[in-house]
Amino acid sequence: MNFLVLCLVALITWLSPRRTGLPRDPAHRWMDEVQRLAQRRSGKPHWWVGLGIAVPLVSLVGLLWLIEGIAHGLLTLLVHVLVLLACVSRRDPLGAMTSSVELAWQRGDQQAAALIAERDWSIRSDSAESLGQAVRATVALEALRGYFVPAFWYVLLGPVAALGYRLSWLAAERRGAAGAAADEACQALEWIPLRLLGVSLALGGRLDQTMKVLRRHLADWDTPSLQLAGHLIEASVRIPLSAEPRLRITRRLLQHSLLVWALTIAFLSLVG
């Protein structure tokens, strides 16, 4: 059923206006409420954040247990699809996420592109080249967190694991002690999928250069996901073009990587 759920989610996100998942972001709204509660309460905030992550997961486990076998499993299928849609990236990294900065690059307005990048993604850069690298790394990280990691943990452990990662990611975006702990948890959950993404990028881009970067960081725990994603993207891009075409190539490589993952999951579903 896992492959069927992934196919349905892919069709909904790519062939409908729902490219950013559900119309509302229930996970984000939930974590906002958890953060407000943690700020009002004295004591250790990471306890409240941990509880805020645990409650939806336990509730989901209970719901899946209650509906198991109802309507020949169609209700379970629906819940799986809705959970994965809740885990999809809200920024559309392979589509509209970078449209504003690309328009600025097309006009040749580097200052506007830098201001947009700082406003939307907190990217600060002194040169056009470093700005392009930072934007490409951000797109790669958003695709990793919004597509690849949820798919990996869903196939491996089911919808509870995918939702757990999504909630941890949202908690990591909040600052403070609780956010730092959630950030470490996210990096642990991203460790394997990021390196598998590197392999799929190597298959679609420059194989030798990408594998060289991947081997150098294969057992590296300290490199942040954003930095490693940027290294892998820069190594896999075939032609040294200007910032905007490189960004298009980045999206194309990530799309090819999604196809590689889909074919691999389909094969594993057939043989397993």
Image (cartoon, rainbow, N blue to C red):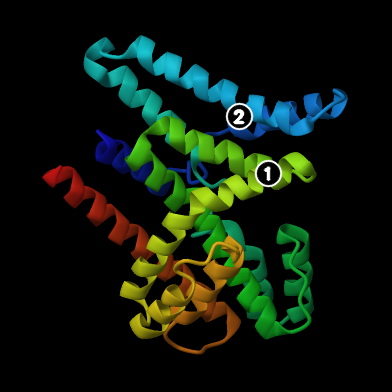
Q: Quadrant of residue 237?
A: bottom left
Query: Could you say which disc has been placed on residue 108 in the image?
Result: none
Toward the left, the furthest residue is 271
Q: Is residue 7 visible?
A: yes
Identify which residue is drawn at 40% across, 49% down.
14
Dot 2: within a 10 Å radius of its alpha carbon, few (fewer than 14), some, or many (20 or more) residues?
A: many
Residue 184 percent location from the top left of the image: 62, 49
- Mark 1 lies on residue: 181
Question: What residue sits 39% from the left and 24% below the top?
Answer: 79
Q: In what quadrant of the picture does the N terminus appear?
A: top left
Q: Residue 251 at what x, y percent from top left?
A: 46, 67
Left or right of 83: which side holds 11? left
Please report the residue visible at 72 percent of the width from the left and 73 percent of the height from the top. 113
180 is higher (above) or lower (below) than 227: above
Residues under labels 1 and 2: Cα distance? 13 Å
Q: Amino acid under label 2? A: Ile
Residue drawn at (36%, 14%) of the image: 65
Classify residue 22 as left or right of residue 209.
right
Q: Which residue is mark 2?
A: 53
Could you tell me if residue 85 is visible in this image? no
> Between residues 97 and 199, which one lies in front from this camera angle?
199
Toward the viewer: 216 or 209? 216
Helix, strand or loop at label 2? It is helix
Rendering quarter of residue 110: bottom right
Q: Residues within 10 Å of mark 1 (few under 14, many from 20)?
A: some
